[in-house]
C-alpha cells in the first residue's frame, strides 16, 4: 500500500496532536448538554473515531450515508441521502463531521437538511479543508488541516474504496490513478463518500 503513495502530507503523530486540540475546542464550544454527532460515512469514519474518543462530553453518535457523483477524483456536485431514516435532531445541538471540505456541496446539503429537521445548532468539523474557492458558501468551525487543491487519500479518505486505512494523509502516485488495480474503468458513478 505504501508503494502506491507518492508523498506523505500529514503523518500520524501530527494528526493525533491536532485531534487533541480539536477535541478541546469542541468541548469548550458546546454547552454541557448532550451532543448529537453525525458522522458522514464512509470518509469521516477514521477521523471521527479518533476525535470523539478525545471529547469529554456525553455524545450520541449517528451515521449518515450520503453519496455524491464522482468520476473517480472529481466531485460533480449532486448529493443524495441514502438512509431510510434521518437521525432525530429537532432541538438538539449537532456536531457534523466529514473527512474533507472540497467544493462544499456535501456539507452544504447536509447542513440544510439538519436545519430543515429542526436542529437547534449545528457546528461542523473536518479533518481537512482544501485551500480553494468553494462552489457553495459553507464553512467548518473545526478544521484539522488546510491542504492544497490536490486529491489526497488515507485516514478515512479513499480512492475507489481503497486506502482508507492508511494511518496518514498522502498523495497517490499518478500511475495508480491512471491505472487502478480494481480492473474497473474510472468512469462517472455514484460512490459512497
Ligand atoms: P465536497 O466537494 O462536496 O466538499 O466533497 C465531497 C466529498 O468528496 C468528500 O466528503 C470526500 O469524500 C470527497 N473528496 C473531496 N476531495 C477529496 C480528496 O482529495 N480525496 C478523497 N479521497 N476524497 C475527496
Ligand atoms: Mg470519498
Image (tube, helix red, strand yellow):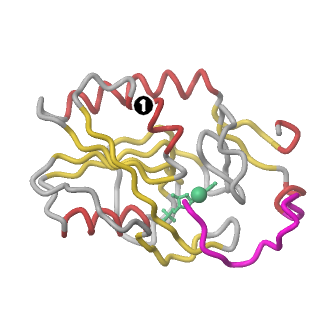
In the picture provided, is 171 more to the left or to the right than 64?
Answer: right
In depth, the one of 186 and 184 nearer the eye is: 184
Horizontal and vertical percent position of residue 110 = 34, 64
Where is residue 177, by image quadrant?
bottom right
Horizontal and vertical percent position of residue 104 = 43, 64
Above or below for 28 versus 193 = above
In depth, the one of 15 and 166 nearer the eye is: 166
In the picture provided, is 156 more to the left or to the right than 137?
Answer: right
At x 45%, y 73%, the residue is: 79
Q: Mark 1 points at which residue?
A: 51
The stretch of residues the image draws in magenta is 178-193
Above or below for 107 versus 186 = above
Horizontal and vertical percent position of residue 119 = 16, 57
Horizontal and vertical percent position of residue 69 = 57, 75
In depth, the one of 119 and 134 nearer the eye is: 119
At x 41%, y 22%, the residue is: 20
How would you classify the magenta stretch by its main secondary structure?
Answer: loop
Q: What element carries label 1?
A: helix
Amino acid at each position: 500500500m505504501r508503494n502506491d503513495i507518492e508523498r506523505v502530507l500529514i503523518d500520524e503523530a501530527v494528526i493525533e496532536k491536532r485531534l487533541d486540540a480539536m477535541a478541546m475546542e469542541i468541548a469548550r464550544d458546546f454547552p454541557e448538554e448532550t451532543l448529537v454527532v453525525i458522522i458522514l460515512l464512509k470518509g469521516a469514519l477514521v477521523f471521527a473515531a479518533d476525535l470523539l474518543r478525545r471529547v469529554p462530553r456525553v455524545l450520541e453518535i449517528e451515521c449518515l450515508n450520503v453519496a455524491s457523483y464522482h468520476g473517480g477524483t472529481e466531485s460533480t456536485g449532486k448529493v443524495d441521502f441514502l438512509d431510510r431514516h434521518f437521525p432525530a435532531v429537532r432541538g438538539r445541538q449537532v456536531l457534523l463531521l466529514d473527512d474533507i471540505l472540497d467544493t462544499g456541496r456535501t456539507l452544504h446539503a447536509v447542513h440544510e437538511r439538519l436545519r430543515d429537521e429542526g436542529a437547534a445548532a449545528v457546528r461542523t468539523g473536518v479533518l481537512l479543508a482544501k485551500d480553494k474557492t468553494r462552489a457553495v458558501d459553507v464553512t467548518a468551525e473545526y478544521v484539522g488541516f488546510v491542504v492544497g487543491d490536490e486529491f489526497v487519500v488515507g485516514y478515512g479518505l479513499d480512492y475507489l474504496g481503497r486506502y482508507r486505512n492508511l494511518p496518514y494523509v498522502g498523495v497517490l502516485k499518478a500511475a495508480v490513478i491512471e491505472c487502478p488495480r480494481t480492473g474497473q474503468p474510472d468512469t462517472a458513478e455514484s460512490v459512497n463518500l
